[in-house]
Image (cartoon, rainbow, N blue to C red):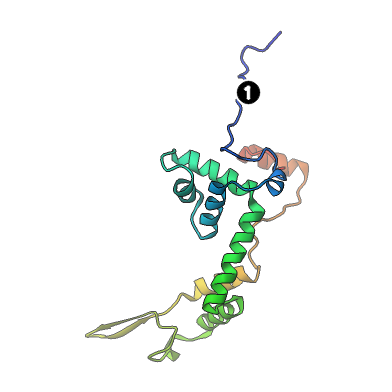
Amino acid sequence: MPDTLSKPKQKIKKPPNMPRRRNAAAKKEIPEHHMQFLVAVAEGADYLEAYRRTISKDCAISTAQVNGCKIATAYRLKLLELKKGRAKSIEEATGINAAVLGRWWQRVMETPADEIKAGDPLIQKIRRSKDGDTIEVPSKMAASENLARALGVFKETVEVDASDEVMAAVKQLFGRKKAS
C-alpha cells in the first residue's frame, strides 16, 4: 500500500548548461556566461554579485546565490586556476608577493609605536590638533592574524576523530548529517 503522507520527490533544477557530473565539467567546454561568472568571482566578486552581473540581473537573491555556488563548484578547478593567475598578475604588476607581505606584517608587529618617525611607511594617517599630533598605524593584531593565516597556523577545516556515541550526540544537537 503506498504511503499517502510522503511527499513526492522534487527534482532540483540546474542552471542552464550545467554539467550533470562534477568530472563532466573538466571534459566539457565552459559556456561563455559561466566563464564570465568565474572571472568575476576570481576578481573578488561574491557569488550573488557575479551571478547577477553576468548571468541574470533580475533573479531572486537566493537563486543567484545557489546557482552561483553550483557553477563555482562545478568548475572549481578552473576557478582556482583563474584566482592563481590573477594573484600572479598582481604580483608581477606590484612586486608584492608572500615574502614581501610577510616582512611587512612582521615589521608592523615588531615596531614599537614610539619608534615610528615622520615619513615612516607604517604611518597610515596623521591627525593634527591643538593638543599635538596623533598618528594611526596598522593593527598589530590584524598583522599577526594575517601572518599566521599565511603560514597555515589557522586551519580552515578541522578533522575530528570521535567515537560513534560522541558523533551521534553532535548530530542530535546540531541536526546535521555526516558530510560525504
Where does residue 75 sit, x and y in percent of width and height? 64, 49
Observer-nearest residue: 121 or 157?
A: 121
Left or right placement of residue 81 versus residue 65 in this view: right
Picture quadrant where residue 101 is located? bottom right
Left or right placement of residue 154 versus residue 108 in this view: right
Instruction: Name the image quarter holding the N terminus.
Output: top right
Amino acid type of the residue tagged 1 in the rendering: Lys
Where does residue 6 sit, x and y in percent of width and height? 63, 17
Where does residue 100 sit, x and y in percent of width and height? 57, 80
Question: In the image, is residue 135 above or below residue 26?
Answer: below
Picture quadrant where residue 85 is located? bottom right
Q: Mark 1: few, some, or many residues within 10 Å (few <14, many ≥20)?
A: few
Q: Residue at x 56, y 53 (%)?
A: 38
Q: Which residue is mark 1?
A: 9
Count of residue discs: 1
Provide the secondary structure element on which disc 1 rests: loop
Question: Which residue is farthest left?
Answer: 130
Q: Residue at x 59, y 35 (%)?
A: 14
Q: Residue at x 57, y 37 (%)?
A: 16
Where does residue 23 sit, x and y in percent of width and height? 72, 45
Q: Residue at x 51, y 55 (%)?
A: 40
Question: In the image, is residue 40 above or below residue 173?
Answer: below
Observer-nearest residue: 173 or 48?
A: 48
Instruction: Name the image quarter holding the C terminus.
Output: top right
Question: Which residue is farthest top?
Answer: 1
